Image (tube, grey):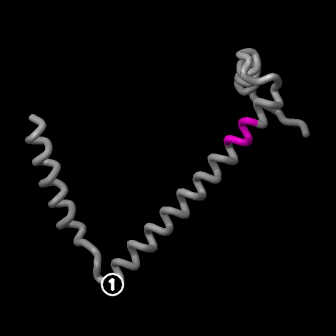
Amino acid sequence: MNVSLTPELETLIHDKVSAGRYTSASEVVREALRLMEERDQMQELYKASMREKIAAGMASLRTGQGTDGEAFMARLDTDLGAIERQDQ
């Protein structure tokens, strides 16, 4: 496999090897790919979690357990105002 890198990426890899944490450019690239895969997996878990929360929220709305958004925001504004006054 042949990979073309920008000069900035080549410098980054060289700096990582020079710092002594990695023994070769291949090690740096393998680590970067491993971290990318880990990040992708975490994003998928996050998306799945959000889908579950949305589904639960929609189900609660269908059963009439929702909260009026305007009333909620008004209460939130009131509560935040009270907290800010306490902090002064």
Asked whether the viewer can see residue 7, the reply is no
Q: Does residue 82 appear to the left or right of 58 in the view shown?
A: left
Residue that mark 1 sits on: 63
Query: What is the residue that sits farthest to the top in this orientation?
Result: 18
At label 1, which amino acid type do we have? Thr
Q: Indicate the position of residue 12 as horizontal and vertical percent values.
A: 70, 23
- Quarter of the image for the C terminus: give it: top left
Asked whether the viewer can see residue 30, the reply is yes
Magenta stretch in the rendered image = 31-35
- Quarter of the image for the N terminus: give it: top right
Q: Any magenta on residue 2?
A: no
Query: What is the residue that sits farthest to the right in this orientation?
Result: 1
Q: Does residue 19 appear to the left or right of 23 in the view shown?
A: left
Residue lying at 29% horizontally and 82% vertically, measured from the top left: 64
Total numbered labels placed on residues in the image:
1
Q: Is residue 39 above or below residue 71?
A: above
User: Circle 1 — which element?
Assistant: loop
Residue lying at 58% horizontally and 53% vertically, measured from the top left: 43
Based on the displayed image, in which of its 4 quarters is residue 21 positioned? top right
